[in-house]
Image (cartoon, coloured by chain):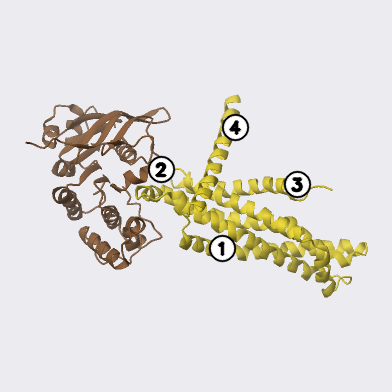
Amino acid sequence: MLTAVGRQVIAFFAYFGQTTQLHVDNLRGLLTGKLEYRTTISQMAHIGVSSLPIAAVTMVFSGMVIGYHAAIQASKFGGGGYVGWLVAEIMCRELGPVLVCFVIAAEAGSAMAAELGTMKVTEQIDALRTMATNPVDYLVLPRYVACLVMVPLLVFVGDIIGVTGGYFMAVLSPYISHVVYFSSIPGNLEAWTVIAGILKSVVFGLIIAIVACHQGLTCGQASEEVARATTRSVVYSIMLIYGANLLLTIILFPPG
Amino acid sequence: MSKVPEPIIEVNNLWYRTGDADILANVSFEVQRGEIFGVMGMSGAGKTTLLRLLMRLVDPDEGDIIIAGESIMGLSETQLSRIRANIGMCFQYSALFDSMTVAENVAFGLRRGSKLSEEELRRKIAEHLEIVGMHDTEEKMPSELSGGMRKRVGIARALILNPDIMLYDEPTAGLDPIMASVIDNLIVRLRDEFGMTSVVVTHEVDELMSISDRIMMLYQGRITACGSPAALQQSDNPYVQQFVHGTAHGPIQL
């Protein structure tokens, strides 16, 4: 029992060390001009194309549900004039960054883990090394930078889609007009709320890229290992996003 | 004055373990410059692991590997790139980049390591594909090729970098006899014309006997025998005899 717990603790620290090292290697590669621009742009396009449709569907429906509840509850207390702001606040602070990043982890992150895992199993990563090409610089850095750019962008678009989704349900209420829904946002929603949400998404984007690429690079040699690495990449990303979200919420929105 | 043989690869007391199993146990040998050095043994004898260790794609538990007079133990990945630039590797399953065309695969190392014009690159790609009998396949994707064709493209990809040493992992496995002969002739021609050193890992005994200058036999991670093809054929070592003659009965545990 104690041995098993000890093994898990060692495995946790080993994982933490390896992912931190991967992060440092990427920063070093970025600072020493190792970025492959063509691959990075292709990765950015891939993340955008694969994740935007599902992120949009997720955000529009989430926005509609929040808008529906907010409209009913706010109307009871005569607060119908604040529904637009309430939806925007919830979207920008929490739901936008978290839900969009879940979608990206499941869609683009899993694809990264599967692609690198397949390259590992078929010895393509070893082939890169034999041709004096560092796999981290060639494969991981473009995905890391692509996530760094695209995840905040997708979250920002997701926020707008979510607020718009809320509008469609909120205006069904007789107490909330089309104009009031949107006009309540500029005066009440602080710029910091939007910025903080975007900052969260930058961290979540790095988590998705590092976790997915690490799973791909450390995948075992058997083909079923690719499937395991892909699943682990999504599960670990989501768990780490939960943890990071709590931490970042406390740091970015301190009490008082 | 006769030329003194110069080892280009020296392996000293090499150990490689996974868990409790010794994949390679106290392996020591030398490969001379310009030599074709064959490594034979049963599946799981540690042959492929040995090639991966020579490239330091994996790290040994103990021992030293010296390439062209320089120990590769303790070198960083960046320092290893310099050593690896002089070693070509032909992988067992070819390891072609499946998102790239044949031409992009063959040109990969050259495009990154040299400043050749696109015209010169195209010429070199065509020249090396011709050598392995794969002309006019530049625009094909690896998924459109058979296993044997992929292997030949893999050899062209390694050869185009003009390495001093070539490591071949089962170079003719899965090839028809004619193409296997073409690859064998190519390995011999590279030695005769360019003085290239080759380490060929396979369990194809006839192939090794016909092309190798020396052959080493591995059994359960240990060197069972090492010598010229003629010496191995005449060896009274029962393990060598059983493997060379391919008999089911003998000391080799199946």
The answer to whether residue A62 is left or right of residue B104 is: right
Q: Colour of chain B?
A: brown
Q: CA distance from mark 3 to mark 2?
A: 40 Å
Who's the residue at 71% across and 45% down the image? Answer: A247
Q: Which chain is yellow?
A: A
Could you tell me which secondary element the residue under label 1 belongs to? helix
Q: Amino acid under label 1?
A: Ser
Q: CA distance from mark 1 to mark 2?
A: 34 Å
Quadrant in which residue B3 is drawn: top left
Q: Which residue is mark 2?
A: B77
Q: Which residue is mark 3?
A: A250
Query: Marks 3 and 4: in contact by CB < 8 Å?
Result: no
Tell me, yes or no, if residue B109 can be seen here: yes
Specify whether disc 4 shares its chain with disc 2: no
Q: Position of residue A202 (x, y in %)?
A: 63, 54
Disc 1 or disc 3, which is closer to the eye? 3
Q: Which residue is mark 4?
A: A9
Q: Chain of mark 2?
A: B
Q: Chain of mark 4?
A: A
Q: Amino acid under label 4?
A: Val
Quadrant in which residue B225 is drawn: top left
Q: Position of residue A106 (x, y in %)?
A: 59, 55
Give residue A50's mark.
1
Q: Chain of mark 1?
A: A
